[in-house]
Image (tube, rainbow, N blue to C red):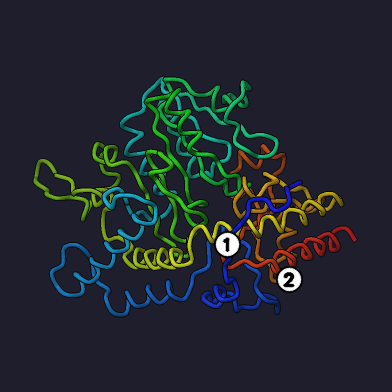
Amino acid sequence: MMKKNEGRLKHELDTEKIRKDFPILARKINGKPLIYLDSAATSQKPQCVLDAIMDYYSRHNANVHRGVHTLSGEATTMVEEARDKVANFIGAKREEVVFVHNASEAANLILYSWGEKNLHRGDEVVVSLLEHHSNFVGWQQLAAKKKMKFKVIDISPEGLLQIEGSSEHNERGVVLGSLATLLNPHVKVVAVTHVSNVLGTIVPLQEVIAMVRRKAPEAIVVVDAAQSVPHMPVSVKDIGADFLFFSGHKMLGPTGIGVLWGRERFFASMPPFLYGGDMISEVYLDHSVWNRLPWKFEAGTPNMAGMVGMGAAVDYLSTVGMQAIRDHEKRLVSYALPKLEFLEHEGLIKFYGPRSAEKRGGVLTFSVVGVHAHDAAQVLDSQGIAVRSGHHCAMPLTQRLGTSATLRASLYLYTTKEEIDLLIEGIRQVNNVFRP
């Protein structure tokens, strides 16, 4: 059970005011007010982001960087200002902020540009069991291709990353164990999420990375921050990773835009991921010269409206305050946990992940006993409640939990306690439908 008054939360959000900024929240679904609890999949967009995208297309649309006419100059200024906003948001240098289409592309950029060049037979790759497929499958496949050892960091029964400990065993031919047992000088990559998209588990990255530096000094650390950057203060300087990536659409921005941050010294030595326009400086018959960072990794016409929209989303989040958002979600999780634990005590659900608001983000994952997740989600949808059902692009973790699919209710700055109450009522209604 969670402790009372866990973590004194000082930052209060005016949720009622915030909700007015999101037009879609006024919708009704099946005749009932929309209760959107699927922000971990994609967040809703405030009017200012929608306006920024429309303004770009309506008044400034042109290709960037090489045009000398007015519109091209305006467009170039707008997208590079967006880069500056993102860089400031995560405490990075602008040269280290590469725009990509999504977090999955960012992970693949690291894999193909750095991994193909620097990893070899006999090296070892370590990923966590908490990973989204984007930060798991690629490393798994590259390890098989290059005859490297692929190892997985296990989790505790509560869903916490197992950092210390001596446990280690083989499962399906893969070594599974604590981080401490998996690290050695042969490890060249450690890929780990900051916040689990399934369990909400917050990984203590500084502790993890400090151990990696001691035990595997040649390893790079790749962090999936898709579920942390939108929800809490994140500084790449404080974290100390080598690469970190996230998506715009999960942080109030548009789809089709994401960010890869990496240390300049790594980017400088990496070959381009894609070839074409804008990523080159000079092209001759016999060779080409690459553009400067970050454009070396941004081939072709970029998603300019997406960049502008992401910049507007960063402005909005910065105005609200990332610590205020984190505190709001902790407050909601603290409110929801006892209610979900009571349902579990009644035998209606099985709840997954840490039982502490300090140790998890705004993700609540559970199963309704005796009811498939998709069926339960449909009943909730009939009540206007949008949750995610399935394996959440994390099949190894879902299987480790002993199930094929779960329900996930994910919260954000526009979520209210009243919506938590309606979710609890909705779960009871699922039980009434399938277990009258």
Q: Is residue 112 left or right of residue 164?
A: left
The circle drawn on residue 195 is none
Q: Is residue 435 left or right of residue 103?
A: right
CA gap between label 2 and label 1 equals: 20 Å
The circle drawn on residue 412 is 1
Decide: is 87 above or below 183.
below
The residue beneath circle 2 is: 383
Front-most of 103 and 17?
17
Q: Residues within 10 Å of mark 1 (few under 14, many from 20)?
A: many
Residue 169 makes an appearance in the image: no
Name the image quarter holding residue 398: top right
Q: List x then y, in percent, for residue 406.
A: 69, 50
Q: Residues within 10 Å of mark 2 (few under 14, many from 20)?
A: many
The residue shown at (58%, 40%) is: 130
Which amino acid type corresponds to the residue marked 2 in the rendered image?
Gln
Which amino acid type corresponds to the residue marked 1 in the rendered image?
Tyr
- Regarding mark 2 in the picture, which secondary structure is present there? loop
Q: Is residue 287 left or right of residue 47?
A: left
